[in-house]
Amino acid sequence: MTKPQDKYDVIIIGAGMGGLACGTYMAKEGMKVLMCEQHSVPGGYCTSFKREGFNFEASLHWLNGCGEGGWIYQVLEELELKDKIEFIQLDPVRRIIGKGYDLTMFSDTQRLEKELSQMFPAEKEGIHRFIADCITLVDKTSEAIMLYMGKSYGQVIDSLFKDAKLKLILYSLASPSWSAIFPMFQVGWLSHQDYYFPKRGGARVLAYLFSDAFQMYGGELGLGKMVSKVLIESGKASGIELAGGEQIKSGCVVSNADARLTFLKLVGREFLTDDFINALLETKICPPGFLVSLGVDLDLKRMGFGGEMITYNPAQSLEECSTTDPQRSSITFIIYSLRDPSLAPPRKHAMGILAVLPYDHMNNWGVEKDGGRGKQYHELKQKVADELIASAENVIPGLSQHIVCRDVATPLTYERYTLNTRGSMMGWILSPGDTASLSLMGSRTPIENLFQAGHWTMPGGGVLPTILSGKNAAELILEGKK
């Protein structure tokens, strides 16, 4: 990026997928756009990293809406990018393993219903209704969406099923306290065969596709540019101030950053109502993840594994699987190189093991009082990683003896690279009846000329809604310029 100009039509804070989509739409329309990203690479959580010849994913599990007519397909078509990236279709999509069950979820929902009914014959009627309603939700029937929007996932599951093992299998999709919409969409998308992954290169291919297009259309991308303040004049956003004190003016500002960071630090409480501040502080955020990325020399394909997401429940109750004990908590892992062989050296595989562990685990992961990450922090994170690998060995025998490369990320790692509060993976948690979180979502904000994009504006998080949030913000701004 060259030296910033005196004034832009739009300045975007953060080059996550929401900011990239927003900026690309506006730059394509001829607007003068500056995007400032504090990290050295674009993409936010939609990124990959390389270690010793292995390419690892930071968080991407799959993409929805990439098939013809899908939402991402339409965005790529509108931005003239459709022919510049290829996707593979994932099938099977998920596998859920525990004591006495091993369920593989293919895109054939009739097959899923049959297998679940064979496993739990007494629950056949409820299984049929559950899967049918999941499909109806994805087919955009407004009545079905309204019916389930006000219910928690736990309320839906408890109303349909009695068998504890079946409930645990279904709770592998999402926490009981979350809105029922999101886990039910996961099942419904199966019927549309709507699960994809970049054919070659992983998540960063998608991020760089958008960042390159943004710059091709005339946008300016500043990597390593930390924004310290949103400038407010007469109650309106009028630009930004960089960490070094440099001020840059603009007609409007779009924040793709963490919502609490955006309003409480970059904007300031003096410009916000008490109700809005309380909503920011009281609304629950999605928990962070603990990720162990492994390069291994096992022949995992011959062992019967594929590229599906695998959830392993070591315990037999939801309470035990939801524990903060790494040896008993549920884990999820994906062997990414069985989707894309280019992600690992020949005859080796790249995989990730993810557990949901709290930000303040074991006294904030042993971080020192001054924030330093010393011996205690590094020993603790490696100990937790060892425990998760040992748990995964119940599914992949001998795993620990075949590791040739290893990288460990704690919630603090995610917070450092993304600036998301407490390393949150998907922004706000939308719970039934939670009107406060709804007041925080959407592209418009209480500050005139300040807009939002990213997973803090769309319930459920993920790449698809994040990209759509960027498109929505761009459309609002472009409409206002007419």
Image (spheres, rainbow, N blue to C red):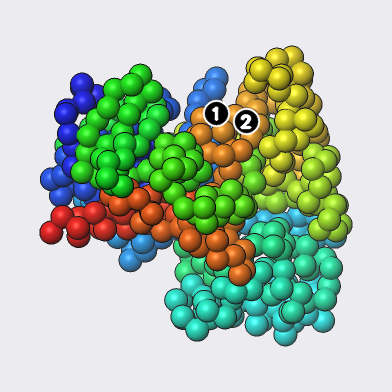
Distance between mark 2 and mark 1 Cα atoms: 6 Å
Residue 59: mark in rendering: none
Q: Residues within 10 Å of mark 1 (few under 14, many from 20)?
A: some
Say how many tags the image has: 2
Q: Between residue 473 and residue 354, name the one nearer to us.
A: 473
Q: Between residue 175 and residue 99, name the one nearer to us.
A: 175
Q: Are marks 2 and 1 in contact (CB under 8 Å)?
A: yes
Q: Secondary structure at mark 2?
A: helix
Q: Is residue 8 visible?
A: yes
Looking at the rendered structure, the kind of residue marked 1 is: Arg
Estimate the x, y position of residue 268 in percent, counting from the top left: 44, 39
Residue 422 position (above or below residue 141): above
Q: Is residue 24 visible?
A: no
Residue found 64% across the figure and 40% down from its top: 289
Residue 56 position (above or below residue 141): above
Residue 131 position (above or below residue 44): below
Residue found 57% across the figure and 44% down from its top: 425
Outermost residue on the top side: it is 375
Residue found 26% across the figure and 58% down from its top: 476
Estimate the x, y position of residue 146 in percent, counting from the top left: 52, 79
| Left or right side of 40 for 343 | right
Estimate the x, y position of residue 125 in percent, counting from the top left: 72, 85
Looking at the rendered structure, the kind of residue marked 2 is: Leu
Residue identified by numbered label 2? 412
Q: Secondary structure at mark 1?
A: helix
Q: Between residue 228 and residue 125, name the one nearer to us.
A: 228
Residue identified by numbered label 1? 416
Estimate the x, y position of residue 75 in percent, counting from the top left: 30, 56
